Each structure stands twice: as structure tokens, then as C-alpha cells.
Amino acid sequence: MKSSQEINELAAALAKAQGEMGAAIKGAANPFFSSKYADVGSVIQALKEPFANNGLSFVQFPLRKENTAGVTTRLMHQSGQWLEDKYTLPIGKFDSQGVGSCITYARRYALQAIAGIPAADDDGNAASQPHIKEADVIAEYEKACDLLSNGTPGDFILFSEGLEQGMRELVFNRAPKGKISAFKKAWNDRLNEFWRPLKETKKLLPGLVAKQDDMGVRELVEELSPLERERLLIIVDDVSKTFIENMGEQA
């Protein structure tokens, strides 16, 4: 771990912030396993206001070393004092998706650790989320049903990403008894419907980029909607991302 010469003010501010923090709700559903986890968004939501109230902030930078990938996380105080450490994980699959997954997990774990945030299960009970009104849950459930029936995958992913912390599980639990699992499956199927073609495009890009095939990359990217292009840049490797961005600047 690295730090500024003094960390007394940072330590005092972090102690106050930790006193204000709640747990990061395990509200994100893993579509491949019957489990829930506190995603990066939930962790940031838990620390955002307490950090701001006490002059704290953070930055994270991706890193790669041999068979591992992860992040460097720096915790900063308005006084200029700081703490910094690296956190890496072994890469399970040596492609951009495998590296990206490592970095995503490392971001979450490192941020929880440096801020001292526990992860709490969300039991789906509205009483555990007193700021969420039952009427709002019903409205979001009805909107989800409408988008599942009539909306595009892009419409649905924006809706899903925009749900307030803890709201997703409450919406799931509004489904009729015995239909919750089917509702969750339909939800995840629609999300996968958005991501599936982007993952296919992602697989094709490295070969085209390696050949400097501007036309081939342009044909792939121009088939995408603005939202799809925006999300593609999140999941592709840095080389492909830079190539696409430079191509756009030259257009």
C-alpha cells in the first residue's frame, strides 16, 4: 500500500464517512447462477453521499500484469492526503472478456475493501427500503411488463440500468406467485438479447483491427444503434476501442 506522507485528516474523514454508510445491497442478479451480488453501482451508491459529505473521493485505474488483471484504487481527501493500493485477480480466460471480468470484479472488491463497506442481502421486503414507495414498485413492474412485451432490447436495458438501488428485487417480487422465476428469466433473456450481438461483434473486432481493416470495422459498427455503439466501447479491449474512436474522429 502507498500513501501520502500524512493521512491523519483522511483517516478522520473516512471514520466519519463509515459511520454514515450502509451496506451495499446484493441486488444484481447473476443470470448464470442462482445468486445475487452487490455490483459496482451498489457499492458506489453506498459510499457516494458519505464520501461527498466528508471531502472524500476515489479513482480506479485498470492494470494487467502477466496472468492477472485488476485495478489500482486511490482514496483521496480534500486536504490532498491519499491512500492507494493495487488489487489483482488471476485471469480465467485469456481474451478481452476474461480480462474485463477480472477488472470488473477487482473494482468492486477493492472499493468495498478500501471504504469498509459490507454487502447485505436484499430480502425483497419493501420495509427494508423505506424510501421506495409501493406505488413506485407497482409502476416499475407494469413498465417492465410493457417493455418485455412491446419494447426493444435497447429500451429494456436502459430501463433496467435506471432502476434505483434495491428496486429490481422489489419489482421481481411483484410478479404473481409461482411466476417470479419465469419473470426473472424473461428479464435476463431480454438483457441477453441486447448484449448477444455486441458480444459477437466484439469477437470479430480484434482480427479486423489487427489487419487495420477500417472498412470492415466501419461496416460492423455502423450497423449498431448509438446506444449499442456506446455499450460496445465498454466491453471491447483498449486497442479496439481506440481504433473505433479514431475512426470516428476521421469520419
Image (cartoon, helix red, strand yellow):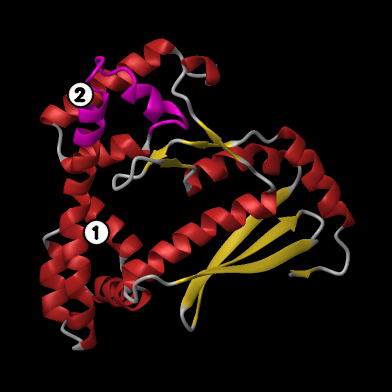
The spot of residue 37 in percent (x, y) is 46, 43
- Labelled disc at residue 229: 1
Q: Is residue 231 above or below residue 72?
A: above
Kindly identify the amino acid type of the residue bearing the numbered disc 2.
Cys
Judged left or right of residue 88, residue 217 is left
Which residue sits at x=46%, y=80%?
67
- Labelled disc at residue 36: none
Q: In which quarter of the view is residue 250 placed?
A: bottom left
Name the residue carrying label 2: 145
Kindly identify the amino acid type of the residue bearing the numbered disc 1.
Arg
Q: Is residue 170 magenta?
A: yes
* Residue 62 appears in the rendering: no
Q: Is residue 8 magenta?
A: no
The spot of residue 106 in percent (x, y) is 52, 61
The spot of residue 210 in percent (x, y) is 23, 87
Judged left or right of residue 147, residue 132 is right
Judged left or right of residue 201, residue 241 is right
Dot 2 falls on a residue whose secondary structure is: helix
Which residues fall within the magenta stretch?
163-186
Q: Toward the viewer: 124 or 22?
A: 124
